[in-house]
Amino acid sequence: MQKIPTLFLRDPADRSRVLPEVNPQCEWVLAGEGTPTLKHDGTCVMLDADGSWWARREVKPGKPTPDRFMPVNVDDVTGKVMGWEPIEQSAYAKYHAEALANSGHDRPGTYELVGPKVNGNPDGYEAHLLMPHGWAPLSVREEFAAAPRDFEGLRTWLLARPYEGIVWHHPDGRMAKLKARDFGAAR
């Protein structure tokens, strides 16, 4: 699990905002490469090939890691260690169990856990669900396929919609993201 880079560079004076300068790692998006998909506003979970569920976890510098924590990488800017912890020891374990019962996913991969008790439920889900990453209804996929790929166009497009953001998926596995709040918008 690598942290997905943001499409535009962050403002060093206010890291919550982006500048109209493309992140060099993400130039491929502005070149028209990759498929834009809906960024769900929840928390990331993973079903591994052995059938075990894991929750994404960030550990701040100097803090102890949870039991059975699997570190994946370290953010060079913040020093946070990103990795996975067993779902049963996650604060989201109860909601994950409900989502699994509601969604029934059994294919290895990553999912977004969404619902009434996850991140304030900005998308208004009535139940806890597991959304496969990269999945959205056809109408939403078509809407995202038509999204602009320039700073001003994306700012206008994202701020006019109820979505958290966009994640672009390149065929070679690279990804890039952009959130509405990167422009200073509150959701």
Image (cartoon, rainbow, N blue to C red):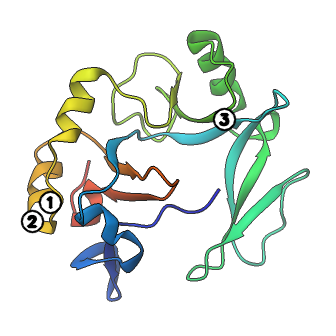
Which one is in front in this view, the residue at disc 3 or the one at disc 2? 2
Residue beneath the point at 13% across and 53% down = 148
Residue displayed at 34% across by 41% down: 37
* CA neighbours of label 2 inside 10 A, class few (<14), some (14 to 19), many (20+): few
Kind of residue at badge 1: Arg
Give x and y (percent) for residue 32: 24, 57
Instruction: Kindly identify which residue carries mark 3.
Output: 92
Dot 2 amino acid type: Glu
Mark with earlier residue (1, 3): 3
Tally of numbered tags: 3
Instruction: Give the residue type that dot 3 points to.
Output: Tyr
Label 1 vs label 2: CA separation?
5 Å
Secondary structure under tag 1 reads: helix
| Residue 72 screen position, x and y as percent | 74, 62
Q: Earlier in the sequence, mark 3 or mark 2?
A: 3
Q: Is residue 175 above or below residue 49?
A: below
Q: Answer yes or no: do the residues labelled 1 and 2 have beta carbons within 8 Å?
A: yes
Crowd band around label 3 with a 10 angstrom C-alpha radius: few (<14), some (14–19), many (20+): some
Residue that label 1 marks: 155
Vertical side of 25 occupied by 162: above or below: above
Please tell me whether mark 3 sits on a helix, a strand or a loop: loop
Tell me the CA gap for discs 1 and 3. 32 Å
State which mark lies toward you, 1 or 3: 1
